[in-house]
Image (cartoon, rainbow, N blue to C red):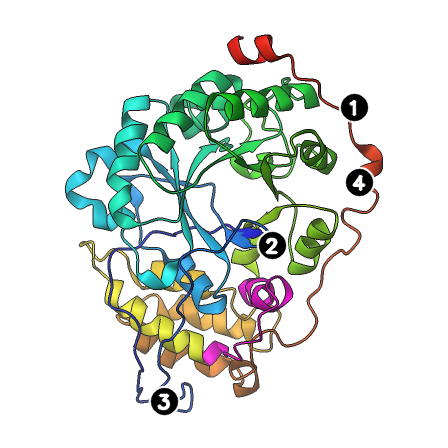
Amino acid sequence: MVKFSAYSLMISSFTPFHSIILKTPRRFSRNIPFNHSTKSRVASYYQNVELHTEDMMGASRYLPPLFRTLARLISKHAWLYTEMLAAETIVYQQGNLDKFLGYSPEQHPVVLQIGGSKLENLAKATELANAYNYDEINFNCGCPSPKVAGHGCFGVRLMLDPKFVGEAMSVIAANTNVPVSVKCRIGVDDHDSYNELCDFIYKVSSLSPTRHFIIHSRKALLNGISPADNRRIPPLKYEFYYALLRDFPDLTFTINGGINSVVEANAALREGAHGVMVGRAAYHYPWQTLGHVDTAIYGAPSSGITRREILQRYQEYGDSVLGKDGNNRPNIREVAKPLLNLFYSEPGNGLWKRKADSAFMHCKTMKSFFEETLVAIPDSVLDAPIAGGVPSGREDLFANVHDFLPPQYQAREEEALYA
C-alpha cells in the first residue's frame, strides 16, 4: 500500500462537483461531470497508496482539505490521510466539528490522524469522530515539531513512553469500530537502536489491539532542529523497517521516508513492504506522482483525465469554500496554493506561477483566477491524459537491503511489557 501526505486535508461539508460551463471555453472544455467515486474500503492494507501529512492543524489556522481534494481528483484509489489534528481541538470544538472533521463522500478511503497526550481527550475525540465515518484512526507518534513534541509533549516524544501509547491505542480502539494504527519514527535522539524500536513495537502491540504501524525510517532529533531538518539530517535506515517484517510477521508495516516516486514505491513493495507512504513528493510533483498511482500500484486502467478537467472540477470546489470561515479565509492564494506544482517541468510552468502571483492580488474567484493564469499553459499540456509517459525514480533504492538487516529481535517479555 502506498500512502501520501498532504498539507490541508480536512474539509467542511461542500456540494459535490458538477459540470461547469465557463465563459472561456478555449481554456476549459464543457459539461464534464464529476464522477470520481471510490470504494469505501479495500480488502486489506496491501498494495495501497496513502497520502499523509505530519503537520498539526489547530483551530487558529485550520483550512479546508485543499490538497486532499486535488489528490482525489487525480487518484481514485490512494488512501488519503488528514493532517495531524490535536485531540484537544476536536474536544474543544464540539460545536464546530464539520469544519474540522467534515469531508465529502468522494474522499474515501480517508484516515483521520490524531495526536495527544491525555487519554480522556483521545477517547472523546475518537468518539466524536465516529459520526464522520473515517476509514481508520491513526495515532501520531512521529511528529518532531517543537510545538508538538516539545510544549505539546506528544508526537514523536511518545516513543519514549510505549506503555502510554499502548494505553492510548486501547482507548482509541475502544471508542471506534474502524481499524487503528500508529505512525512513528525508528527512534528518538540516542534511543535509536533496533532493539529499542522493537521494544516499542512489541509493547504497543502487546498492550493494545494495534496491528498496523507506519514507520518513518529515520530517527527524530529533539535538540531544537526544525521539522524540515528532521526529514533530512537523520539518515534513512530502511534495514530497520525490513527487519520489522521479519521479526513481527503477525503485524502490518507501512514504510515511509525518502520515497519520492511511484517507481520507488514499487521498488519497496517488490522487496516485501506491506505498504508505502509518500509525503511531500505528492505535493511537489502531484501530476507525476499521483498520476501513476492507480495504474502502476493498483493495476487499474487509466482514467484518461486531463489537467484541464481536474482544474475545472477544482474550480467549483474552490469557489464554494472561498471566504467560508469569515475574514476572507480561505482566500484565493490559500485555495490555489495546492495547484501551483501541477505543471511542474511543463512548458509554461514559470509563466503560470508568475501570473498566479499577480492574480492573487486582485482575483476574487477561482474562475477569474484561472481565466487570468491558464493562458500561460499550452493546450497540449492541459489536454494530455493522466499517466502519460514513464515515471522516473530509483528502481535500486532498496537493492540489497536484506543483506544489512540487524540481528533478530528477541522479545524480553516481562521487561518489555512492564518497564
- The residue under label 4 is 401
C-alpha separation, residue under disc 4 versus residue under disc 3: 50 Å
Task: Name the N-terminal-most of marks 2 and 4.
Answer: 2
Between marks 4 and 3 in the image, the one whose residue lies nearer the viewer: 4
**Residue contact between numbered discs 2 and 4, judged by CB atoms under 8 Å:** no
C-alpha separation, residue under disc 3 versus residue under disc 1: 61 Å
Residue at 60% from the left image edge and 13% from the top image edge: 413
Task: Name the N-terminal-most of marks 4 and 3.
Answer: 3
**Residue contact between numbered discs 1 and 4, judged by CB atoms under 8 Å:** no
Instruction: Tell me which segment is drawn in magenta.
Output: 286-308
Is residue 41 in the magenta section?
no
- The residue under label 3 is 30
> Is residue 165 left or right of 297 when viewed as pictured?
left
Furthest residue in direction bottom, as rendered: 26
- The residue under label 1 is 407
The amino acid type of the residue labelled 4 equals Val
**Residue contact between numbered discs 4 and 3, judged by CB atoms under 8 Å:** no
> Is residue 108 left or right of 267 when viewed as pictured?
left
Task: Name the N-terminal-most of marks 3 and 2.
Answer: 3
Q: Quadrant of the C terminus?
A: top right
Q: Is residue 362 at least partly visible in the picture?
A: no
Residue 39 in the image, given as x and y percentages of width and height: 42, 62
C-alpha separation, residue under disc 2 versus residue under disc 4: 20 Å
Residue 275 in the image, given as x and y percentages of width and height: 60, 48
Q: Nearer the viewer, residue 175 or 4?
A: 175
Q: Is residue 389 above or below residue 272?
A: below
- The residue under label 2 is 47
Q: Is residue 353 at least partly visible in the picture?
A: yes
The amino acid type of the residue labelled 1 equals Pro
Is residue 305 in the magenta section?
yes
Q: Is residue 39 above or below residue 270?
A: below
